[in-house]
Amino acid sequence: KVEMERGLSKETHAIAPVKMLPTYVCATPDGTEKGDFLALDLGGTNFRVLLVRVRNGKQRGVEMHNKIYSIPQEVMHGTGDELFDHIVQCIADFLEYMGVKGVSLPLGFTFS
């Protein structure tokens, strides 16, 4: 635990044997969640964007919609700015496709 705390600390991160990144996850799900959520998965040569709709009450359930985008070789071997510009274009396309463009959604990002 001490080594993880050193890895998370701004003052000791650079010299810590265990490098850590804060998750900013403040709570775990308790089953009362509802609404629309955006999930992003960047892995290998593909980028997947998902819209997850969590409903409770009579219509309780989870509905997922997703679209997979390929990452061109020139983007994979380019700069970080080029990669994230491509990601933004994919997200914008997906939001328009799903009819939720301009809506603010909670987002999770996975690097797989």
Image: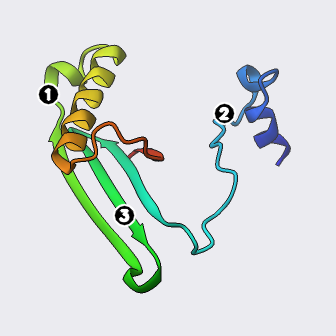
The residue singled out by tag 3 in the image is: 53
Please state which of the two labelled residues, at mark 3 or mark 1, is closer to the viewer: 3
Label 3: element kind: strand
Mark nearer the N terminus (3 vs 2): 2
As rendered, which of 17 and 38 lies closer to the eye? 38
The percent coordinates of residue 39 (x first, y second) are 38, 50
List x then y, in percent, for residue 96. 19, 40
Q: Quadrant of residue 110?
A: top left
**Residue placed at 18% from the left, 32% from the top?**
71
- Pick the residue in front: 15 or 84: 84
Is 41 above or below relative to 52? Answer: above
Q: Residue at x 30, y 53 (%)?
A: 50
Residue 62 x/y as whole percent: 37, 72
Three-letter residue code for mark 1:
Pro
Q: Is residue 7 left or right of residue 40?
A: right
What coloring was used for the rendering?
rainbow
Residue on which the image places disc 1: 72
Can you give x and y, in whole percent of width and height, for residue 32 in the image?
A: 58, 73
Residue drawn at (41%, 80%), measured in percent from left and top?
A: 60
Neighbour class for label 2 at 10 Å: few (<14), some, many (≥20)?
A: some
Q: Which mark is residue 22?
A: none
Judge whether 49 appears above or below 9 on screen. below
| Label 3 environment density (alpha carbons within 10 Å; few <14, some 14–19, many ≥20) | some
Q: Which residue is mark 2?
A: 19
3D distance between C-alphas at marks 2 and 1: 30 Å
Amino acid carrying mark 3 in the image: Arg
Q: Nearer the viewer, mark 3 or mark 2?
A: 3
Q: Are marks 2 and 1 in contact (CB under 8 Å)?
A: no
